[in-house]
Amino acid sequence: MMLDTDIKEDKDGYYVIAGTASVGGNQVPTDAHLDGDYWVFRIKSDGYFDADYSKVFYGDNPIGGNDYARSVVVDCYSGDYFVSGWCKSCDPNDGDEPQVLLIRVPFNDFISSVSQPYGNIDQYHLYDYGSNNIIQPHDITFGVCDANDGFFSLGTQHPNIFGLGCFGTTHDFLGIKTDDALAEDANFIDGCDDNTSGGLAYGGRKGDNGWSTVQTCEGYLIVGNTKSNNLDLTCTYPTYPADCQVTCNHYNCNPIAYTEDMWVAKISSSTGEFIWDESIGTSGNDGAYSIARADDNTFLIAGYATNATNNDFQVVKFQLAECPPPYNLTAVVEYCQIKFTWEGLACDQSYELQYRKIGGLWITVNTTDPIYLTPTLSYGPYQFKVKTQCSPDVYSDGYVVYGSSIIVPLSCLKLADEDFDLSKYLLSISPNPSDGSFDISLQLAQQTTNELATIYILDQVGKIVSTTHGTIAENGVMEIKMSTGNLPSGFYWVKIIHQGKSYQTKLVLQKE
């Protein structure tokens, strides 16, 4: 039997595949056991099987049962492959209780792999553990890739038959955080039932199974299916963590009606602390198998939903209601402009900058980076604040800075034809007003060789909305046709930069 469960593209364009193989031979290494092992191999983009990079992995117990690789991720820094799953052959007591088995397979060197089991199994307690998903926090999705970002794995733990688990005897979500050497993060070790090696559990008094996880700016979202709810009359467990974590807000919130629901929870990325949760469901059994983060900072959950007559796919899209605000906000006047700078978390996507002359109306600018602005208001002082865009419709609170010292020189607010000596150059736009297409003509007083100049179109607050280049001929003349595309009607500046000098004039767009 061969079963492939995950695939990722590596840094050289190969595809690494993780799954299960039960018999050696053909493309499967001959040391595969009859009861099943992790099988990791890679193929080229055309499907060519790379026989030199194919290996099976298993635990130290030769009597153990099936091992299932469930997830693989490629280290954005080293390119190594990290694999997680369920390992019954890791049971040190010749039993049939699985542990989480994490494997690091060096890129281009499958022989020098490193394995590490997790789970507190002994001959009395009969725990079982497994991982269904492994991710690399702060990976290239967030624009940051460091040498030891570590990994986070989500799966399931099944406490022992004597009821000594964190939430009782049923399944719980299980989170394990490690470094690049697969050593467990000490902040993520469970504080209940003397479990010193096995991650952190999440859930309630009934069956909960974790399937997928994704990183947010300050934590992880974990999803799966749950039968628990915090109205359960048995939710009185006196030790850590108190009672059930699963909030009852689903279709049939009844303490004795145990249908399954999707469950999504947020936990801290530094300590594993439980932060909040939501259960999502219908009148039947529902569950979540996957969660992904979209480019617009929303999240998508994919799973299933059932009722009396149907069993359907279910997709849930949502956005977070809060995220950390930016910090270290500063504003410095540099000639005619104010330079705004701030700091944020690596995974922040974009920001909303607001500024105003004190007592006036706020002017809003959406941006991804600290920027320069040329205010068109009368000279300061100004107020300004920056908010993080948590989701398409949600922004963080913004720190307000009272910039009493941020005063733009009055001379910078004059029109362009008052700022420059017209005897030194002639810049014109025709027609002006324009419907969006126009000619630019620049005549310099001095002759020059053929040289490129940069042409900017800026909006009223100084934000660059268009950039192009033009050539100044030897006689000092540049003529170029321009189109503003989809820019709306309004007042703009046309600015030309050549040899460190700036030439600018007004542009009025009047579109039907």
Image (tube, rainbow, N blue to C red):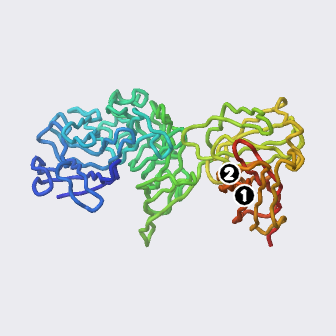
Whether pointer 1 and pointer 2 mark residues with C-beta atoms closer than 8 Å, the reply is yes
Question: Which is more toward the observer, 257 or 509?
Answer: 509
Quarter residue 82 falls in: top left
Q: Amino acid at mark 2?
A: Ala
| Residue, disc 1 | 478
Q: Does the rendering let one see residue 66?
A: no
Q: Is residue 426 left or right of residue 501?
A: right
Indicate the quadrant containing the N terminus: top left, top right, bottom left or bottom right. bottom left
| Residue type at numbered disc 1 | Met
Give x and y (percent) for residue 95: 17, 39
Q: Provide residue 101's location: percent of width, then percent of height.
A: 27, 40
10 Å crowding of disc 2: few (<14), some (14-19), many (20+) = some
Residue drawn at (44%, 47%), measured in percent from left and top?
213
Percent position of residue 375, x then y: 82, 44
Position of residue 27 relative to residue 462, above or below, is: below
Q: Earlier in the sequence, mark 1 or mark 2?
A: 2
Give the label on residue 388, or none.
none
- Which element type, helix, strand or loop, lies under badge 1? strand
Q: Nearer the viewer, residue 251 or 234?
A: 251
Local packing at callout 1 (Cα closer than 10 Å; few below 14, some 14-19, many 20+) is many
| Quarter containing the C terminus | bottom right
Position of residue 78 relative to residue 466, above or below, is above
Total marks in image: 2
510 on left or right of 102 = right
Q: Which mark is residue 453?
A: 2
For discs 1 and 2, the disc positioned in front in the rendered view: 1
Residue at 24% x, 35% y is: 114
Closer to the camera in the image, 132 or 307: 132
**Inter-mark Cα distance, 1 to 2:** 9 Å
Horizontal and vertical percent position of residue 52 = 17, 49
